[in-house]
Image (cartoon, coloured by chain):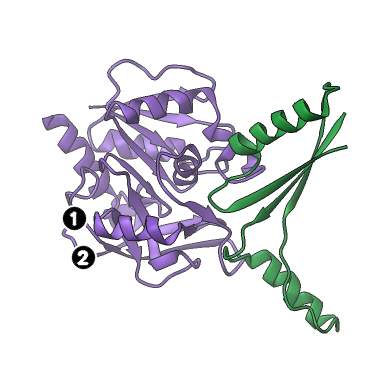
Amino acid sequence: MHAAVVVFPGSNCDRDMKVAFERAGAKVTMVWHKDTDLPKGVDVVGIPGGFSFGDYLRCGAIAANSPICQSVKAHADRGGYALGICNGFQVLTETGMLPGVLLRNSGLKYVCKALDLKVETSNSAFTSGYNAGTTITIPIAHHDGNYFADSDTLKALNEEERVAFRYVENPNGSQQDIAGVLSENRRVLGMMPHPERMAERTHGNTEGATLFASLVGQLADA
Amino acid sequence: MKARVHVMLKNGVLDPQGEAVRHALGQLGFDGVEGVRQGKVIELDLNETDAAKAEQTVTAMCEKLLANTVIESYSVEVV
């Protein structure tokens, strides 16, 4: 299983993501934002957390228009997998690969803490290792994680079981407590919480590692 | 020529920053402020001499990068 982790100026969770993939058994290549092509044979592209391009203009907007994102989009269009965490989720919404957008937190403050998430579906390569309905503890660290989408989009997300995670206690004003969403083909996941920061015993628990293990396991079998 | 782009959150999208400004104005004793919306102004210097073309180009820039039309509306003014 081969993962590529994209690095933008201002990314700061790229190496954490690399370690999480590696511990799950994946081979990882780091990819610079100016590269035009993904390495051959990449199964999944990881878009890490951080503050790509200083969050200038809108979070993720400038990264979404970088050369590598054209390739990431093409990879997803071919049925490839992509995982965007935190700023990576913002980038995926800005490219249009995932619906909706992340607005400024309703409380206006940057929020950084571990909190409870409800796993809404186990029907995806990312979440197959969890039981739907269970609660896991994963940290968040964001200023702009307030998920917004129009009512038709929300209806479709619910009907198609594409909400992957919801906050048990909403920290940012997200509509319907949404913390993470899947694409139509369920192969692109964007989420604000950081599973890579809850992936080793020293982090507190390993509930985030399950996501990487599920993904690597599913793709290794494929 | 110059172009000026105004980007605003669409009506119906909660604007917590505008709301915080409204609250602060009330605290300062400015009564009667019923709503505040906060947006962005982006000024562009263009080497274009045709106003219609400039407006067309800047509109394309708004659609592609300067605004996220899921939540934002924009207006283009060529000066």
Residue wearing tag 1? A130
Q: Amino acid at mark 1?
A: Tyr
| Residue at point 83%, 24% (across, down) | B50
Q: Which chain is purple?
A: A
Q: Amino acid at mark 2?
A: Thr
Counting from the top left corner in percent of width and height, residue A134 is at: 21, 65
Q: Quadrant of residue B18?
A: bottom right
| Residue at point 57%, 63% (across, down) | B13
Colour that chain B carries in the picture: green
Counting from the top left corner in percent of width and height, residue A138 is at: 36, 59
Judge the density around disc 1: few (<14), some (14-19), many (≥20) Cα neighbours within 10 Å: some
Q: Do tag 1 and tag 2 residues touch (Cβ < 8 Å)?
A: yes
Task: In the rendered view, tell whether residue A165 sits above or below residue A36.
Answer: below
Pointer 1 indicates a residue of which chain? A
Residue A134 circle label? 2
Task: In the rendered view, tell whether residue A69 sits above or below residue B29.
Answer: above
Q: Quadrant of residue A96?
A: top left
| Residue at point 70%, 30% (across, down) | B56
Counting from the top left corner in percent of width and height, residue B65 is at: 62, 36
Foreground pick, A63 / B39: B39
Task: In the rendered view, tell whether residue B20 sits above or below residue A52.
Answer: below
Quadrant where the image shows the N terminus of chain B: top right
Q: Is residue A72 left or right of residue A127?
A: right
Task: In the rendered view, tell whether residue B46 sits above or below residue A211.
Answer: above
Counting from the top left corner in percent of width and height, residue A20 is at: 32, 40
In what element is the residue under mark 2?
loop
Pointer 2 indicates a residue of which chain? A
Q: Is residue B46 left or right of residue A124?
A: right
Foreground pick, A27 / A186: A186
